[in-house]
Image (tube, rainbow, N blue to C red):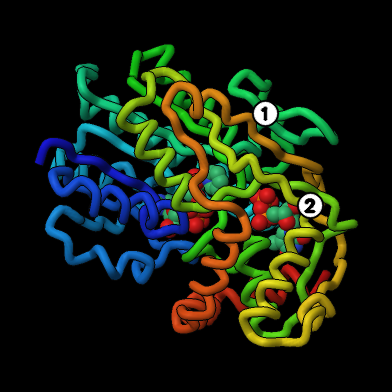
Amino acid sequence: MNKTIFITGGAGFIGSHVVRLFVTKYPDYKIVNIDALTYAGNLENLRDVEHYSNYYFEKINILDTDALERCFVLHQPDSIIHLAAESHVDRSIVSPLDFVYTNVIGTVNLLNTAKHFWADNFAGKLFYHVSTDEVFGALGDTGFFTEQTKYDPHSPYSASKASSDHFVRAYHDTYELPVIVSNCSNNYGPNHFPEKLIPLSINNCINMKPLPVYGDGLYTRDWLFVKDHARAIDLIFHKGKTGDTYNIGGFNEWKNIDLVKLLCKLVDEKLKRQPGESEKLITFVKDRPGHDRRYAIDATKINKELGWKPSVTFEEGLSQTIDWYLQNTDWLKHVTSGSYQHYYEEQYTKR
Ligand code: NAD
Ligand code: TYD
């Protein structure tokens, strides 16, 4: 094994795609998935790779310093790709402290453990922190977030991610810990937990349930297919410059209402519904407090320096994603049983 990599949050949406890519592409790497298996973490996401001999799983909460230390001693990692986080804005509005614990304190715990374990001998080591474009705040009708854009988070989620980014950079500047940070736009694709706009809309649309659109529906996001994010992480991990930041985006802005209409059209075609039938499910609901109007990433740096660009168009990616949900109804059933029903009730039926 010529590298041992800890991937935190590997049972979640993006993490599972990163784990799959690394386990299958790099048989010489030992990949250790560290995940607490919260409501968002699901080992079913990794069924197809769990038998690989270079894949290991450790059920650990990153707040548990002792367990992390034992895991470092056992597996001797030389790199960490850190994705574990509480990731949903609406949940952060209800329970901000959960986001402080995992996203801020959990990240500092991991930084401390890495620093301590690597004993300040950082040659060949890397702490790669995966973050979001939401740390930059909201854009008006024009402009893009670059790597130089000042942080201006508005939700407890984005504030906690911004804080974790600052800590990662502080460990670089203060202790010379080799770090890289990437800030990515909204992801979509298979295995996305159906609390976020796209998987929730697909799930509801398939089941002929209302499609909740917040406020006037004119909020804009820049959507990237999750496998393209995983490819970007692979490139940055191997070729990125230590101490640097990389923005990753889809060059693909959509107003929420237009996106939901496109999704309805694709579902109508796939399920042989009358054109326009699914659109009737669109329901405007009360807005999210502190809702950022527009996100858009300028991904010129990663394109120019590392040659990365998205590989699928939005229509292709969305169509593949809807197909995946139509083919994986058991996965959907499992993740939407139990606590999901309670969440849905609190979030949507009491608005
Ligand atoms: P997710 O919610 O699907 O998965 C998070 C994973 O982290 C889950 O497997 C969960 O069990 C695990 N986890 C949560 N708390 C933990 C803890 N205390 N200890 C150990 N494991 C814990 O999230 P995601 O959408 O896959 O996002 C992954 C990362 O990418 C996050 O850091 C997020 O901020 C970032 N990101 C997400 C997006 C997006 O659109 N989803 C975009 C840019 C960046
Ligand atoms: P979301 O998927 O939660 O991602 P984020 O808030 O991190 O960008 O939301 C994407 C956009 O969709 C955002 O503008 C909020 C909006 N939205 C709805 O209109 N309805 C919904 O049910 C959800 C979950 C989100």
Say which residue label 2 marks: 255
Q: Which residue is the extreme one toward the left?
A: 1
* Residue pictured at 56% horizontal, 60% vertical: 316
- Residue 285 x %, y %: 86, 66
- Residue 82 x %, y %: 39, 40
* Image quadrant in which you'd find residue 321: bottom right
Indicate the amino acid at tag 2.
Lys
Indicate the amino acid at tag 1.
Phe
- Nearer the observer, 344 or 231: 231
Say which residue label 1 marks: 145
- Nearer the observer, 269 or 306: 269
- Nearer the observer, 15 or 296: 296
Residue 13 in view in this figure: yes
* Residue pictured at 41% horizontal, 20% vertical: 171
Quarter of the rendered image showing ligand 2:
bottom right
- Residue 13 x %, y %: 46, 58
* Residue pictured at 49% horizontal, 52% vertical: 226
* Image quadrant in which you'd find residue 141: top right
Comes first in the chain, label 1 or label 2: 1
Q: Quadrant of the C terminus?
A: bottom right
Residues packed near mark 1 inside 10 Å, few (<14), some (14 to 19) or many (20 plus): many
- Report whether the residue tagged 1 is closer than 8 Å to ligand 1: no
Residue 98 in view in this figure: no
